[in-house]
């Protein structure tokens, strides 16, 4: 048995940015059980703000509209100076991270969060499907959605390394993979993993790219993410301690859809199709990538460190589907 060295913080003063996000809110709720917790976000959902305030969160409304470290640092001036732990769960711009490091140079643990998606073996053909360009205000140029997101997350890791090493600020970098929320009344973004459910219940066909039907996800419930995040905050080091955070089991897209159907007493009507990018590049990848079967999607997500030091996630995908069925918030998927 591996020794679990991490501990959930107790009696600490914790700042969570992005505290109304799908991960941030869950981290806040867990942290509030035994700590004083302050949350910064826009808090665009009043219901969620109330839930967090009722749980004891000190909600500080901030909208970081300027795209530079100094302005964001200035916006943080009216917050207390004496946090023990800073957890950055903002999903907005990489500049929040250095602003927080500058504002809190004496913090005992800084938790920077990024994504496992940057480290999975995506192929060009898959990314080709996702190229939707949009104007990026921080860089003053158009960028693909994934490009901007991925770059921000890489930048956050570089900032974290820089401040951790040069300013000696103990740091943990968490690369999350596929967090899921089951109370869909809290966050519209949480609908993501549940999109197929509406079509399953309505008896509609599910159109799915043949080359991603076997794409596996290490889904993890937001509460398990929160526990792992708080535990990991006790393992901050110089240089940064890096963890992949995800569910231990891979579920392919097909398995996830089939489980949803089973729990709701339905059957999935699949309509598989091929993408233009697949047709263009399929042959080129022949040999090392075999999308026709759908089950050879290149996928590398190593959880050895999480398994060694942090608690095992408790909530399975089936539990999540049963929860969303029981709390009936899946019905919100029908609302425009
Ligand atoms: N969700 C995923 O699938 C996933 C996967 C891998 C990694 N991650 C990482 O996990 C971390 C948290 O992500 P998340 O999915 O929980 O994010 P999220 O649900 O989109 O939440 C983002 C948070 O940032 C706040 N925010 C956004 N724009 C802001 C602004 N201009 N000023 C102030 N606050 C602002 C939001 O406030 P309001 O909502 O109140 O406006 C919200 O609290 C990020 O580092 C993300 O990259 C997420």
Image (spheres, rainbow, N blue to C red):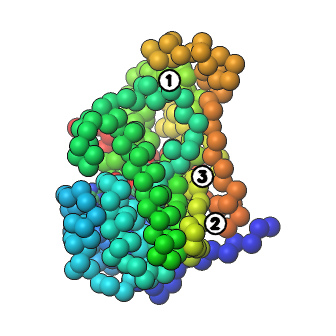
Residue drawn at x 35%, y 38% is 145
Q: Where is residue 295 in the image (x, y as percent from the top left)?
A: 65, 27
Q: How far apart are marks 3 and 1 (CA)?
A: 26 Å
Residue designated by label 3: 247
Residue sitting nearer the eye, 109 or 55: 109
Measured as percent of width and height from the top left, residue 280 is found at 50, 13
Q: Say which label, 3 or 2, has the lower sequence index.
A: 3
In the picture, the disc for residue 168 is: none
Left or right, 186 with reference to 271: left
Mark 3 within 8 Å of ligand 1, using the beta carbon? no
Q: Which of the two marks, 3 or 1, is nearer to us in this view?
A: 1
Q: The residue tagged with tag 2: helix, strand or loop?
A: loop
Q: Where is residue 222 in the image (x, y as percent from the top left)?
A: 47, 58
Q: Which of marks 3 and 1 is nearer the N terminus?
A: 1
Q: In which quarter of the image is ligand 1?
A: bottom left
Local crowd size for mark 2, using a 10 Å CA cut-off: few (<14), some (14–19), many (≥20): some
């Amino acid at each position: 048995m591996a020794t679990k060295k991490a501990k959930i913080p107790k009696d600490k003063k914790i700042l969570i940015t992005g505290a109304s996000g799908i991960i941030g809110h869950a981290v806040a709720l867990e942290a509030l059980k035994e700590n004083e917790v302050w949350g910064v976000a826009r808090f665009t959902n009043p219901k969620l703000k109330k839930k967090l305030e009722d749980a004891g969160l000190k909600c500080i409304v901030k909208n970081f509209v300027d795209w530079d470290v100094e302005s964001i640092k200035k916006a943080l001036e009216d917050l207390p100076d004496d946090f023990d732990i800073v957890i950055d769960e903002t999903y907005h711009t990489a500049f929040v991270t250095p602003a927080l490091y500058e504002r809190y140079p004496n913090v005992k643990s800084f938790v920077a969060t990024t994504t496992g998606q940057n480290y999975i073996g995506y192929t060009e053909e898959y990314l080709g499907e996702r190229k939707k360009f949009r104007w990026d205000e921080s860089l003053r140029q158009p960028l693909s959605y994934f490009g901007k997101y991925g770059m921000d997350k890489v930048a956050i890791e570089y900032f974290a390394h820089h401040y951790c090493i040069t300013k000696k600020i103990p740091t943990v970098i968490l690369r999350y993979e596929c967090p899921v929320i089951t109370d869909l009344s809290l966050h519209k973004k949480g609908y993501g993993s549940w999109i197929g459910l509406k079509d399953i219940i309505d008896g509609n066909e599910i159109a799915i790219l043949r080359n991603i039907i076997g794409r596996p996800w290490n889904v993890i419930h937001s509460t398990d993410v929160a526990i792992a995040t708080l535990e990991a905050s006790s393992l901050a080091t110089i240089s940064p301690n890096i963890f992949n955070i995800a569910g231990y089991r891979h579920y392919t897209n097909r398995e996830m859809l089939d489980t949803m159907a089973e729990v709701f007493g339905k059957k999935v009507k699949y309509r598989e199709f091929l993408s233009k990018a697949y047709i263009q590049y399929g042959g080129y990848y022949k040999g090392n990538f075999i999308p026709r079967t759908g089950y050879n999607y290149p996928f590398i997500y190593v959880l050895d460190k999480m398994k060694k030091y942090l608690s095992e996630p408790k909530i399975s995908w089936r539990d999540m589907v049963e929860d969303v069925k029981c709390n009936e918030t899946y019905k919100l998927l029908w609302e425009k």
